[in-house]
Amino acid sequence: LVPLNIEYLQIATFILIIASLVQFSELIIKKFFPSLYKDFGIYLPLITTNCIVLGTALNNLILSNTIANFNFLHLIVYSLSIPVGYLIVIYLFSSIRVRLESAPIPKAFKGVPIALITAAFMALAFRGFSGIL
């Protein structure tokens, strides 16, 4: 990233690499070791959520060395707020998905398209909170 002068993409790159490796591993295990895949159950996809932990840790490292110079208390509050925010978003998204299952949605929008539309509207709604704090 340094030769291309895009160091600011470091966290996103780490998260993308980890998520890709986990998904690739899941596909390989599912195809060649079905019994192992059944044993892992939900735990293998949950590894992807660890990207949030890595992103928070790396972001804290960057924030502690920036001009803002966050102190220890700020970093603790920030680190605890990230999972709470993630929990709120996942809860809202799952609640909306449950309600959409019984809604009269056109066939072309069922599944992934309506999920992406829902995510877009949620992103717009949460964008309204930026700059409040």
Image (tube, helix red, strand yellow):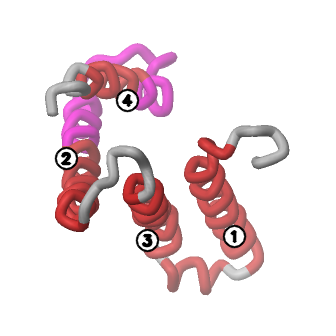
Name which residue type carries label 2. Answer: Ile
**Mark 3 crowdedness (10 Å alpha carbons): few <14, some 14-19, many ≥20:** few
Write down the region rendered in magenta. Answer: 92-116
Residue at the spot 41% in from the left edge and 24% down from the top edge:
114
Q: Give the distance between the C-alpha atoms of the residues marked 2 and 1, in whole angstroms.
A: 29 Å
Disc nearest the viewer among 3 and 1: 1
- Residue at which label 1 appears: 25
- Residue at which label 3 appears: 42
Looking at marks 2 and 1 on the same chain, the residue that comes earlier in the sequence is marked by: 1
Name which residue type carries label 1. Answer: Ser
Looking at marks 4 and 1 on the same chain, the residue that comes earlier in the sequence is marked by: 1
Q: Is residue 7 left or right of residue 129?
A: right
Disc nearest the viewer among 3 and 2: 2
Q: Are the residues tagged 2 and 1 within 8 Å (C-beta)? A: no
Q: Is residue 73 left or right of residue 32?
A: left
**Mark 1 crowdedness (10 Å alpha carbons): few <14, some 14-19, many ≥20:** few
Q: Quadrant for residue 127, please give it.
A: top left
Frontmost residue, 54 versus 113? 54
Looking at marks 3 and 4 on the same chain, the residue that comes earlier in the sequence is marked by: 3
